[in-house]
Image (cartoon, grey):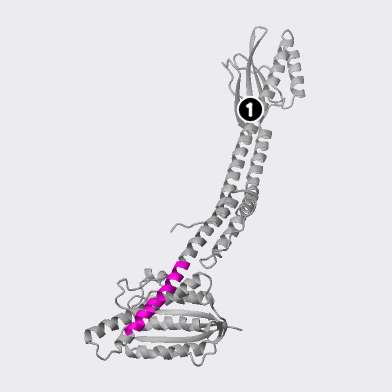
Amino acid sequence: MKRRFSISLQLTVWFSAVFLTGFIVFGMVMWLDLARYTSSGRSRTLARRASRLVELLRSSVNASDGQRAYRFSEFADATPEGNLIQLLDRRGSRLLPVALVPPDYPWPNAAGIGKDRYIEVVYAERHYRIFEHPVIVGGQSFMILVGGSLEDNRQLMARFSTGLEAAIPALLAVSALAGYLLSRRVLGPIGRLTSAVRSISIGNLSRRLPIDQTGDEIARLAETCNDMLARLETAVGRINRFTADASHELRSPISFIRATAEFALRDPHLDADAAEALQEIHAEAAEASRLIEDMLILARADAGHPDLVFEPVNLAELVQEVCDKVRPFAELKQQEFLVSGASDTVAGVLGDRSRLRRLVWILLDNAVKYTPERGRIETVLERDGEHARLRVKDSGIGIAPELLPRVFERFFRVDPARSQVDGTGLGLAIAKWIADAHHIVLSVASIEGEGSTFSAEFPLSR
């Protein structure tokens, strides 16, 4: 399964990555530009020194060798790194070496060189650049060698590189923090919209999302969601009204059919076939009446008019009462019906007594219906801190794992053919509605072919 990250984290990572990438590219461009500038500056310095030497040679073309050497030495003494200057003849022999030049300095072999050239050498683990400048003065060919240290440039580049490397973690932290704060600021309204949407259910479609008068995309999204909620409220209202009206209107004819069948069955002269047909009509009318009553209950609940009356209720007495009424149905199927903890558990809850009775009845009735003959049903009521937990465990047909999330849906039946157990498919949906109205946590665990366990956790009243 692909792991998903929040948009805030993704924006933070992207912002940091883009910011850091931009800084690295900027740093590389600046590093290359600084390296080019310092290198070209060093080369220009060496070229200027060579030009001054050419002027010196031309001014002393008619001077003696001693005078030329003296002028050459004066120039070397007045020049930084003057010990790195050499004058060679066309054969490469040194004419005016500086006395301070190291004897083992790696001067290049400049014989036969006919154009300017820069080369780099290493001496005593230090880097140097040497400028070779051939020149003709007074009809004679000379080669001027001017050297200069590159250590200042290397140190400057090293400090610049160290500064870039040291700045990366700090800039990464700053960019991550800025990206996080920016994403939180941008996504803050979305978080508020998410909380508002989660609080809206089918029972409170009249609520609307808050809209910030910013005119941005988030405001337009909130307006669109509000328009959608308005359409949903209208559509659901029509469906609820239709269901409630239809259920209400059908109650009278169904009741009339049921009463007529009961009256006809009292006729002592009724033949066997007619009696059997009337009994089927009566049974179907009773089933239809229960279905209509369940639909009416859910329609009223969806409309926001559940008619609940909250009062203190002794849950232990209520559970024992319902168990006593269900026990005869279990005995008819020769089922083992066990009740524990109901009589000796003090469990006071706040709720509508008739609805809570209906909730417990639905759980026990389903257990009896879906448990085969000679099966086992166990009802346990126990107290756990500030909650009371009711567990109804049966050894019935069980529920497949893929069907568990749907057991509380309306008209859902575990038996697709609807042939094993009579029912409307609305019982657990009503139980879920009652549980939600009373803040009861209703859950189910089941193993197909072995049975199911329905649990209801009631908050105790103080």
User: Residue 164, located in which quarter of the rendered image?
Assistant: top right
Question: What secondary structure is found at the residue carrying circle 1?
Answer: strand
Decide if residue 124 is on the left or right side of residue 423.
right
Residue at the (40%, 72%) spot, across then down: 407
Q: Is residue 297 visible?
A: yes
Against 438, is 348 above or below?
below
User: Residue 36, located in which quarter of the rendered image?
Assistant: top right
Q: Is residue 104 visible?
A: no
Residue 198 falls inside the magenta stretch: no
Q: Tell me where residue 292 appears, x and y as whole percent.
A: 41, 75
Residue at the (61%, 58%) spot, across then down: 210
Q: Foreground residue, 130 or 201? A: 201
Residue that protrudes farthest toward the bottom in the picture: 344
Decide if residue 74 is on the left or right side of residue 86.
right
- Amino acid type shown at disc 1: Arg
- Which quarter of the figure is the N terminus placed in? bottom left
Q: Foreground residue, 395 or 61? A: 395
Residue at the (54%, 59%) spot, across then down: 230
Q: Which secondary structure class fits the magenta region best? A: helix
Against 150, is 300 above or below?
below
Q: Tell me where residue 95 appears, x and y as whole percent.
A: 67, 16
Against 213, is 273 above or below?
below
Q: Tell me where residue 55 appears, x and y as whole percent.
A: 72, 14
Extent of the magenta region = 241-261
Residue 254 falls inside the magenta stretch: yes
User: Residue 261, located in which quarter of the rendered image?
Assistant: bottom left
Residue at the (76%, 24%) spot, across then down: 77
Q: Tell me where residue 48 appears, x and y as whole percent.
A: 70, 20
Decide if residue 75 is on the left or right side of residue 351.
right
Residue that mark 1 sits on: 129
Few, some or many residues within 10 Å of mark 1 (<14, 14–19, 20+)? some
